[in-house]
Amino acid sequence: MAEHSSPARPGRWRSGAESRQRILDAARALFRENGYGGTTVRAVAARADVDPAMVFYFFDTKKGLFAAATEMPAHLPPALESIFAGGLDGIGERVIRTLLENMDKSDRTPLAVLTRSAPTHEESEALLREFIDREINGRLVELLDVPDAALRVGMLNVQILGLAVARYIFKIEPIASAPVDELVARFGPMVQQFLTGRSPS
Amino acid sequence: MAEHSSPARPGRWRSGAESRQRILDAARALFRENGYGGTTVRAVAARADVDPAMVFYFFDTKKGLFAAATEMPAHLPPALESIFAGGLDGIGERVIRTLLENMDKSDRTPLAVLTRSAPTHEESEALLREFIDREINGRLVELLDVPDAALRVGMLNVQILGLAVARYIFKIEPIASAPVDELVARFGPMVQQFLTGRSPS
DNA sequence: GGTGAACTTCATCAGGCGATGAAGAAACCG
DNA sequence: CGGTTTCTTCATCGCCTGATGAAGTTCACC
């Protein structure tokens, strides 16, 4: 067997930014598949076609890699604004559509990562929850302005969580392969109903 | 420091069944908190106040321990029957109530374990899904007997999943502390609606 | 074209992991 | 009582983990 193409000698192969990106992509995939504990630095390195030491070179520790791999994608906050922009009218469909479209095209799926991962179990879970509570739930409760707003928003959380878990983590059919429009048509009005409809009490 | 009470000599201390039970309890707690990969046999043993070797003595392998710790509680199937027993009328409330009451009083929460755990990622996840598909979804689709039954049942799965994750895993308020009756009142009619209501198309 | 920084590899460390096997102590059984 | 089984501890194995440090290679800049 002759070594045909890769002499595996040290040196500057790639732009550095590229290696960093390769590692991040591999890390995101593995963290999502196997969780934090089930993912080894060596496996990430192998998948990124990179020496394990490079992971530490760029991210110092495994936790640093995790933090970098799960940070919020930049295009999410603007999408969030577009949900609230239209007021209460049709907000049900908007929230479902925005959620699905953003998670469909991105492999970051912060929810997925955080469900099965978390280095210390407290740390990043608390962080994400605080963000969601402040940026989504809080604003929505304010917008609704009814006595049982908190419970209504809680129900929305259940929908979002269930939809995300079913579609992206467990991949339950037919939810996983249903087109976005179908799901929006099904869930949108329902969400709208329990957000702005009359109370069942 | 004098060794005050435990000479730590080998020998028969407890009934064996008791040690086994201690290990199972500790394992369930840790698997749920940290997942399969994040739980070490040594940690389970420490929590059970038992030598690590005992875990292997009773369960042979770590996987064996996992299998024993996550096996389905015996009282679930009968509860399942009671859901279908009443036919389609009020099935929405029944399914929500049964789910909540069973998961509230049990610390097994197979869903919780399976969400964050799974030894090979395929194995037990596939097992639970097969069970759910056969025993719940299949029967329900049959019972509904409409063209879009699969999608309706998929929506039910989303509800169940979201509710379980929100209440028992993420502990999102106010869902986590809401009384069962409140949740049944909110989710029951909604579930009933999209199961037996007219199609949105 | 030489110098220093950026990137990459390799060898290696200490520590924890799952797992094994032997041997000791209590309980059970005749 | 003696022998066997059952429970328990301990010492240890080989492996893989996260992490470090030094040395080598290439590039950018002057």
Image (cartoon, coloured by chain):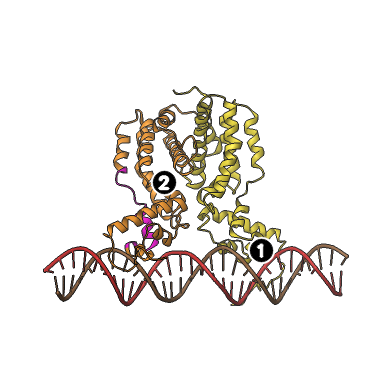
Chain colours: A yellow, B orange, C red, D brown
Residue at 65% x, 39% y: name it.
Answer: A77
Q: Which is more foreground, mark 2 or mark 1?
A: 1
- Mark 2 vs mark 1, CA separation in Å: 38 Å
Give coordinates of residue A110: x percent, y percent: 57, 47
Please state which amino acid type lies under the numbered disc 2: Leu
Which stretch is magenta?
A: B58-76
For the residue pair B9 and A50, the one nearer the viewer reads as B9
SS for callout 1:
helix
Give coordinates of residue C3: x percent, y percent: 83, 72
Per the image, the residue denoted by label 1 is A57
For the residue pair B4 and A6, the one nearer the viewer reads as B4
- What is the residue that sits farthest to the front in this orientation? B1
Question: Any mark on residue B111, and which?
Answer: 2
Labels 2 and 1 positioned on one and the same chain:
no
Q: Is residue B42 magenta?
A: no
Q: Chain of mark 1?
A: A
In the image, residue A180 above or below residue A40: above
For the residue pair A22 and B195, the one nearer the viewer reads as A22
Give coordinates of residue A125: x percent, y percent: 54, 47
Q: Is residue B70 magenta?
A: yes
SS for callout 2:
helix
In the image, residue A49 above or below residue C2: above
Please state which amino acid type lies under the numbered disc 1: Tyr
